Amino acid sequence: MTLYRLEITDLSSLKVCGPDSETFLQSILSNDMTGLTPGQSVFSLLLTPQGKVVFDLIIWRTEDGYIIEVEKSRSAELEKKFKLYKLRADVDISLKDLLVTCLWGDIPESLARDLPFDPRHKGLGLRVPDLDIFDSLNFDDVSETATEGMYKKHRIAHKVPQGSDEIPQDHAFPLEYGLHELKAIDFQKGCYIGQEVTSRTYRRGKIRKSLYRCASQDFFSCQDKIMVGERQVGEICAWQDDEGLALAALAHGCVRLPLCLAVLIHQLCTRFEAREASFCGACRLIGMVTAAGVADGCNEAVHGE
């Protein structure tokens, strides 16, 4: 197995430091900012008061504060929001470019022991920002350069959406996108922006849609609609080569299946002009569905048997 390396350059770092930096971030972000030591990171969210995602963020503790990874194209927007929220908090906020190195595949024990894993999912591998604490590291001799497409496919395999292209700004509810499963929310902490709606939804367990892995030989783009007849049951959130992530309504037919669900519905309706009663036969015609029990599952999921 190979150790793959990708250097991500389209990020900025928002530095937050000062005596009130911890309490400031604790009051606005969804995860717990307390107890972190330099070099540790957490995945967290900035939400609207209605509980919808504005930013998905990876936050690093440093010796003198926090470094927040943010999409470079939206870094000025995040800086403006933080300065709006800080009020009288004694914090300094500044922006600069950030380089992050991602390593996955056959990770040597020496690296796994000394370097941080991605806080969203350990399966994503190591995630190392160009902070002073990691400054002397060089991975060129022990890894093979990967492409952005390879890393995106790796993320999709672990059901990790990221950025405003895949998690629509001001529209996405974090529980629908599975962000709580990626440890972006601490349900034990006190108040933060959007906490009331998010906690209530979690307690009640009423999530209308969910994120699924899907596969197809056809190409799809973000926000492509998934239709059953004239009814939209979901949309594509991320796509790379022949795999993707889809947000779909739990209560609707084949989207209950464990793999290849939402796009399967799309293909059945467009290629075969199928009605719900013919989904099972069409499942067998499309060779992309390889998970055991998928065809059998169709009877229960679609026909309600």
Image (spheres, rainbow, N blue to C red):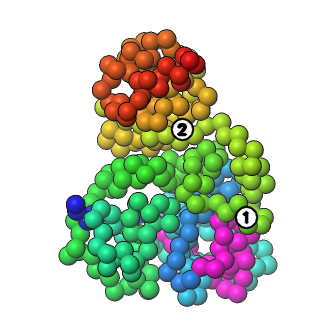
In this rendered view, identify the residue nearer to me: 233 or 106. Answer: 106
In this rendered view, identify the residue nearer to me: 58 or 253. Answer: 253
Q: Residue at 37% of width from left, 34% of height from top?
A: 291
Residue at which label 1 appears = 188
Q: Height in image: 267 above or below 152?
A: above
How far apart are the two marked residues, 1 and 2, measured between alpha carbons?
27 Å
Which of the labelled discs sits on residue 303, or is there none? none
Residue at which label 2 appears = 247
Q: Height in image: 288 above or below 144?
A: above
Q: Height in image: 212 above or below 281?
A: below
In which quadrant of the rendered image does the N terminus lie? bottom left
Few, some or many residues within 10 Å of mark 1 (<14, 14–19, 20+): few
Q: Residue at 70% of width from left, 87% of height from top?
A: 19
Counting from the top left corner in percent of width and height, residue 104 is at: 33, 63
In which quadrant of the rendered image does the C terminus lie? top right
Disc 2 marks a residue whose amino acid type is Leu
Chain part drawn in magenta: 11-36
